[in-house]
Each structure stands twice: as structure tokens, then as C-alpha cells.
Amino acid sequence: MAYDKFNVLNSTAVPLPIENVDTDQIIPARFLKATERVGFGDNLFRDWRYNSDDSPKADFVLNKTTYRGKILVGGKNFGSGSSREHAAWAIYDYGFRCVVSSFFADIFRNNCLNVGILPVQVSPEFLEQIFSAIEADHHTTFTIDLPQQKITIDATGNAEGFEINPYKKENMTNGFDDIDYLLNIKENIRTFSKDTPL
């Protein structure tokens, strides 16, 4: 399933300065019955967003009108726990295109890359700069430059580089998942199979 191409993202951000956010908190297990990547955003952080009577919890960040944007900034060890893909699906379906943290669980990081979410891992010091910038001005913007592999706090100009697997980087800039990538090079595969003796 193809997704939006990712090149340079400029956006405000939503802060979630909580460490060890696991996949069950991102999308509770009772919402994993669907097999398509749609509708999960409604239940992103469900138990943190809503009371038992489905009324919104006013103090949770996603329910505050002051915070908006396509960037979610989380605390250290974001996406720990189970390997469920649905956590990444929920984040994408809600509208986030980038998650920033000082550390990601490996499986969650890969699940994000597979569905078009860019996980940007920064140093703990730079993460604190980001949280401070958002606290000072809820409308502050950030630039995520995938080709240059750099994140910038626009208000200060402070920037830091980040790492990404070259194959995943190519896929994200083209909006490809793994199947799209293979379909894109199918002629090369056919040529190789014809020219390579068994």
C-alpha cells in the first residue's frame, strides 16, 4: 500500500514528554481486530484520551486545541512493548507523519518506516530543546529534511542530524512500501532472471 511521499516536512508539533510509551498505550489491544490501515486514528492513545464514558479527557495533549501538527514528540523509549503494526497505523491514520524521540524500540521504528512515518531519533539534549521550544510557543515550527537527514527548530535555527536506513529513505521519498519498491523494479528483476543461469 503506497503512502504519501516524504521529502521536507515543516510543521508545528504535539508534545508527549512521557518515557517508555508502549504500543498498548498507543493503541489498546481491544482495537486490533481490523486488518486494514484505516480507522485506527480514532483510537490512538484511547485510554489516555477518553474517560470510560467516552468523554474526552481535557488534560490530555491530543484534546487540547493549542497543540496541532504533523509531528509527534515523545519521550525516551517510544514504541516499546509488543510488535503490533497497528501502533504505527494509528499514528499515521491520526495524521502524524513524523515521530521524534531520543530512543525508539527497533520493531516500532521499522513499522513506522513501513507505513510512511519518519522516526527521527535525536540526542536527549536536543529533545529537551524541542520540548522547551514547544513550551515557549505552541505555534513554533520544525523542519524535518529527509534528504539532508536533519531536524531544525525554526525559531532558533538549532539543528541536529539523524540516521535512517538508505533503503527505507529511498522508499519514503518515493512513497513506496516494500511491495511498491519491488513493483517499481520488476523489469530489472525480469532482466536479471533471464540473464542469470540456474
Image: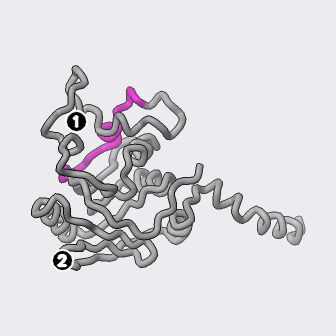
For the point 53% across and 54% down, the residue is 3
Q: Would you place residue 170 above or below residue 183 in this image?
A: below
Residue 24 locus on image (x, y percent): 33, 37
Residue 160 locus on image (x, y percent): 29, 76
Residue 86 falls in image quadrant: top left
Please give the label number shown on residue 111.
Answer: none
Q: Would you place residue 53 above or below residue 196 in this image?
A: above
Q: Nearer the viewer, residue 54 or 118?
A: 54
Whether residue 83 is visible: no
Report the Cα–Cα distance between label 1 and label 2: 32 Å
Quick check: marks 1 and 2 in contact, CB under 8 Å?
A: no
Label 2 neighbour load within 10 Å: few <14, some 14-19, many 20+:
few
The local secondary structure at tag 2 comes to loop
For the point 34% across and 66% down, the residue is 10
Which of pointers 1 and 2 indicates the residue nearer the eye?
2
The amino acid marked with disc number 1 is Trp
Residue 26 locus on image (x, y percent): 32, 41
Q: Nearer the viewer, residue 187 or 65?
A: 65
Q: Is residue 67 left or right of residue 107?
A: left
Q: Would you place residue 31 above or below residue 26 in this image?
A: above
Residue 189 is one of the magenta-drawn residues = no
Q: Is residue 117 left or right of residue 197?
A: left
Name which of mark 1 and mark 2 comes first in the sequence: 1
Task: State which region is magenta.
Answer: 17-31
Residue 153 falls in image quadrant: bottom left
Quadrant, the C terminus? bottom right
Please give the label number shown on residue 156.
Answer: 2
The local secondary structure at tag 1 comes to helix
Residue 106 falls in image quadrant: bottom left
Q: Which residue is mark 1?
A: 48
For the point 36% across and 54% down, the residue is 105
Residue at the far top in the pictured view: 53
